[in-house]
Image (cartoon, rainbow, N blue to C red):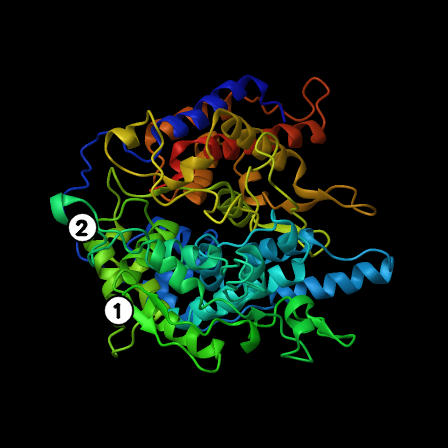
Amino acid sequence: MRLDPLRAALVAAATAVVLAACGGDGGSEGGSSPPPPTVDKPATRDDAARFLAQATFGPVDADIDRVMAIGYAAWIDEQLTRAPVQTHRAHWEARDAEIKAANPANSAGQSEVFESFWKQAVTGPDQLRQRMAYALSQIMVISMVDGTVGDNPRAVADYLDMLGERGLGNYRGLLEAVSRHPMMGAYLSHLRNQKANAATGRVPDENYAREVMQLFSIGLVELNTDGSAKAGPGGAALETYAPADISGLAKVFTGWSWDCPAFPATGCFNNGTSGGATDPDRWFKPMLGYPAFHSTEAKTFLGTTIAAQTTADPSVSLAAALDRLHNHPNVGPFIGRQLIQRFVTSNPSPAYVGAVAAAFNDNGAGVRGDLKAALKAVLLHAEARTRSDTSGKVREPVLRLAAFLRAFPHASDSGNYRVGNTDNPGVSLGQTPMRAPSVFNFYRPGFVPPGTLTAARNLVAPEMQLASETTAAGYVNTMRDNLSAGVGLSNGAPFNRRDLQGNYAAELALATDAPALVERVTSRLTYGAAGAALKAEIAGAVGSIVVPALNTGGTNQAQVDAAKRNRVNAAILLTLAAPEFVVLR
């Protein structure tokens, strides 16, 4: 398509998002007035689509119809019962067998994890489960950027499955599954962690003990239920833990290593094998506690002490420690706020955080840590259903691409959704699922982009930590190419094109009517957020692309069709670059 005259405007629009973030335009829609009471059924299809943009990888017509028919809460309840069509590990294993059948020297790798992620994101019927797993993968992070993790993609696929299963269960069970998963053990180095040895000066590795508190459970400062920091002497925030707490908790995470046929042999602990016997599934089976390597010392942390043991029992220590973390009053507001940020808005009010924390603390039946109840509280709160000048969140690149793929249905030639690695910020998304640069994810929950209206208004915009002039231009160029050539890796014969191809039949039918085309496109991507001025601007640009009359001056049907497709591509690309799409309000 010929869009070169528009590229400067596109990059400028994308860069405007970097500068403005989600700080609003200072309009009359204030964030200070209380939201109206929540209604269970959407008033319009745009309202339903906006809800689905929060709860799924992108709204599609069938889900919009369903939400309109049964309402928000019933749709959530339906989703909470749905299982994946295929687990991520099953997809990886099937592809590994297929690849080896073609050439025994080859095997599946990280790309097949990406395949499964995108296949589930684009086509999975259990959208809410998959979105929850993705959200948790950015809170309880492992990353294939790490060499050991990256070399075990089958186990990474299993970790993602575990987040999908445990993420709709109880937080206590999730925390234990995360703590005992060998991928987390390898990533945060408590796999093969040993008790102290005074003779050699060895002390337990403290890495996981620190991060399980800082990132996975209680955070750095004591919180009120509404997420505000508790004030200590002089008004300073109270720290949740000190170095001594890390050292005490680190003793809990000693003695944990691979599941192994000869457990608890020393060879099993050190190498996952003994006497030539090993378990090929050891990289994803829950780690086992090896008494010989577990600390028997008293373990004091967070105001509790696990008594010294005469006989080492790693399971007893772990259960006591995870119970203490699970019951810490910080967990509800700390995890709840991050779930709100991942699904709905970067800057929830204290009342919103408090409501989610209350659901976490008690699901109504006296159960603490019910993640289904917490998730329903996130999505059904009145604040989630209203727009203001401080509401919403910047859509990270992965979620932008997912919304595009679902808005204009994309099918995979191979059936495997071969999107591939999308790390490169200049020519791709600058973000790949399960490849965060560190345990702190792609961005921090409290990130404030300097020099922006967001910063001036004391707001945060976590996803803006990914943003730069390079990523703004790279995103526009990437989506232009995706529209022109399709998405993902190129397939060989018989297709000889990119693996994912979109269906634009409905848009092509409107190509000669620029305002109608733009109305459809903006509705599918912005859910009512695009105003009249934006739509008129896009329609003007689209209308400048001439659709010649058939058989006039030698024009053939192929030329007419190409001009129509150029109009469709322009309408979609300009909308994808607009702040009204990039920021989900």
Q: Is mark 1 on a helix, strand or loop?
A: helix
Q: Can residue 570 be seen in this view?
A: no
| Identity, as a three-letter code, of the amino acid under mark 2 | Pro
* Pick the front one: 96 or 442: 442
Q: Which mark is residue 35?
A: 2
Q: Is residue 230 above or below residue 69?
A: above
When asked about the image quadrant of residue 266, the answer is bottom right
Residue found at the far bottom of this picture: 311
Percent position of residue 399, x then y: 48, 46
Quadrant containing the N terminus is: top right
Residue position for label 1: 361
Q: Is mark 2 on a helix, strand or loop?
A: loop
Q: Can residue 206 be seen in this view?
A: yes
Percent position of residue 62, x then y: 47, 59
Please name the residue shown 36% across and 45% down the image.
445
Do tag 2 and tag 1 residues touch (Cβ < 8 Å)? no
Please name the residue shown 61% across and 49% down the image.
146
The answer for how far apart the CA atoms under marks 2 and 1 are is: 24 Å
Please name the residue shown 74% across and 57% down the image.
108
